[in-house]
Amino acid sequence: MEYVLDDQRLNGAIPITTSARPTRFARTVRSTDIANFRRAIELNCQMWAGAASPIIPVTDDAQIDPLYVAGLRSQDIDRIIGMEYGALESGDFRAAAEEPEVHFNAIFAPSVLRNKDKDYYLPLSVAMLEENDPWRDIYAVCLGFIPDTPDPELLKQSQLLPKVQFDTFINIERKEVSGSLPDLIARLNDYSSITPRSVSMNKLAHGYQHSTSIRVRNNVLPNPMFDAVDAGPNIVVVCSPGNVSDLSLLWNLRAAHGDSRVLPIGIPRASISVDLLQSLFNPECMSLNGMGDTSIYVTSTSMSVEEIESVIPGRSFRATDPSALVTLGPAPSRTTKQIAIWHEGKASIVPFSSVDESELLNALPPNHAEWKVNVSVDSQKFPNSRSLRVDTFNQQFFAGKTTRSISPRKKESVAIVWPSRLLSLKTIAAAGNFKVKSSEPGKAALTLIESLDDVWELDMFAHRPLVNLLQTMSERQGINWAKKRATQNGETYVTSRDDVAPTSDDLIEQPFEKFKDALNNDTKATTHWLNWAEDRRLIIKGFPISCPSCEAKQWIPVLAFTPPISCRGCDRNIRRPFPQGQVKFKYRLGESLRRVFAQDALGHLLALRFFVRLMGGMSKNLIGLHPGLEAIRENETHIAGEADVLMMLSNGDCIPAEVKKSFVGVTEGELVKLENLRAIWNAPWSVVAVTDYAHNAPDEFSGLEQRGEGIENYRILLTYDQLLEPHPIWALGGDPFEWKPMSIEAISDREKEFAAQLHGRLDFNEATSLESSMLYRRAIKDPAEDAGKAANGNA
């Protein structure tokens, strides 16, 4: 079911996104070797798709730059040139950097143009700068650079003759220039020629699809990716002379965001100024990606944030640490949308479209025998965790998608297997060396959810008087049990799981009028709710009878009524089970709802429903929630922690929530357990939810909230104020978790509105049913009506 972390596999016709692409490599270069870095740019710009290949600095003692450790494993990188084979899978990045090399699967980029005459294409412009020009390497990164002659090993691997030159496929213009920001901007906006980077990316889509939303910087929830999303490509990198780390950062940002705009761009450290940056504030340079918090972000690996701020004060710019902006981006690819027919999580997909075959595949050299195909399913995402990379027999899962090898020479379908949401969660747990299983409350809550048409139907429980009525209906009955409870509890008794009836025979039955009282005395609202609950077996309608012979009592569901009825006490037939007059039906809880109260799990469902409403739908951030999970460390048997609700987000974060029936239950010990659970899941925040209204909370309870900049154990508080909100929304600049107790009048208005909405739904259903009936009668004439017309001579 959507937004529920269950074992349901994909079935039926479901849209997918496929991206057929060349194998993508990252190259390592020593952070002190600028010549090696320049050589890497020359090789990348000669290779097809090479302009999107990251360049990763490593130290002389073979330590990879920490900026890129997580991104290498979680993004579209298939191999690291300069590291041992399998480094991505193992996470062992200690191998020493090597000289830039050409891989056996590389293609000479201009050769992909060979299906057209070279005069058909715009000329390739190569900017030539003096050795001591401070803009030289920035030009090479932003525009690309190719040497006078192609790399011979690359020609050999592409099965091209050694005499082949660049101008065999495209006209070349080499121009001596003096570097400056206006000149670089003009060249990046020049549509009369193409650059070495663009030749390398010919016929491949690359770069992020940037956010077009309205973005506000606030501390509602921790969001370490806010700067990266808000900036998009609007980034300036301050580059110190010959600094490989600065230049690699700029190269990787352009590889990630593409070359459709001037930004990202680099500026020499000696040239940085407010006036220079102001020249970038125009549509020809910036990407207009929605309405953001900051226009341009400025970063550097060689200058601290404080140093940058001292040079460029002002609200239009934001100095940021590169760790908040760095990304390696998606692999260049040929992307299509298609419908896949799934059966139990398996499907066959066609990686190449007919356009791919006619425009691209026929131009590839015969030796190019391996590609990759990425497959993603928007309706059931795989978490895009920065530390998750999973290898199966013939698929890999990372970057929120699955990848497998294909041959562009074989026009055939490819088998794909997609995990359930719960399996994705278990994969994240396994990466943290622990495993998970459903708790008893989680099992009960999932059983109830499975009886619904969809998770949105949990809205039908978002009403305190109704929840209170259902709670009383779940309790035991009988004078003996009441006396025993009174004896055991001389003072005020607090309900517990022991209060819940162990079997359906012990459940309390309630008449229609009790539900009507809970629903603002609205008959139509009550009828609609009971009809809905009966259809899903949450409420059972029946009647009590008593044997006239032995006076034994029993309760008969309407759907189970088949006369004659036998007495359970004396086995005699009850000839007249009903009193004279109309039968008064009553209602009991169905078994799935009884088990929810037996496990004290209704609060779990209300918290799950709130987050689905708040974070599901168009936000695309929520994968799903589970209403009760236990975490067990590897090689151990005892439970390390239990989450009443666990939420998994699209970035792989797993957020635990603790749900309590009363404020008294939120003790220091329970908070310690929640913090331990947050540490187990490495969660950036946690939730404490109480199924009561905030105005009933003790004064010190709101102090348990922990939110703000730099807080490690970030915690939000939820009460009925949020959990029973009919339509939770995240308004621009708003805070859906704000501690703001509702007044008694506001609560009363909300409860009246709940009943009014149920009333309106019944009216709508009745009108729809009547209209459908009328349309049916018009489409299929009533024979009796035709006979009547014929008798009157009107046929």
Image: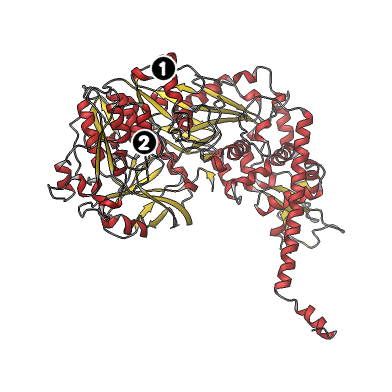
| Residue 468 falls in image quadrant | top right
Q: Mark 1: which amino acid?
A: Ile
Relative to 515, 30 lies left or right = left
Q: Check the image and report above or below for 282 versus 708.
A: below
Which one is in front in this view, the residue at disc 1 or the one at disc 2?
2
Question: Residue 301 appears at what percent x and percent y?
Answer: 34, 21
Count numbered badges in the picture: 2
Is 713 situated left or right of 363 in this image? right
| Residue 554 shows in the view | no
**Mark with earlier residue (1, 2):** 2
- Residue 234, horizontal then vertical, whole percent: 44, 31
Helix, strand, or loop for circle 2?
helix
Q: Residue furthest right?
A: 581
Q: Is residue 199 depicted above or below 723 in this figure?
A: below
Residue 411 visible from this viewpoint: yes
Query: Which x, y percent locates residue 758?
Result: 74, 47
Q: In which quarter of the image is residue 518?
A: top right
Per the image, the residue denoted by label 2 is 188
Vertical arrangement, residue 302 with respect to residue 212, above or below? above
Q: Which of the labelled discs sits on residue 308, or is there none?
A: 1
Q: What residue type is labelled 2?
A: Leu
Bin the neighbour count of mark 1 within 10 Å (Cα to Cα): few under 14, some 14-19, many 20 and up.
Answer: many
Camera-side residue of 631 and 338: 338
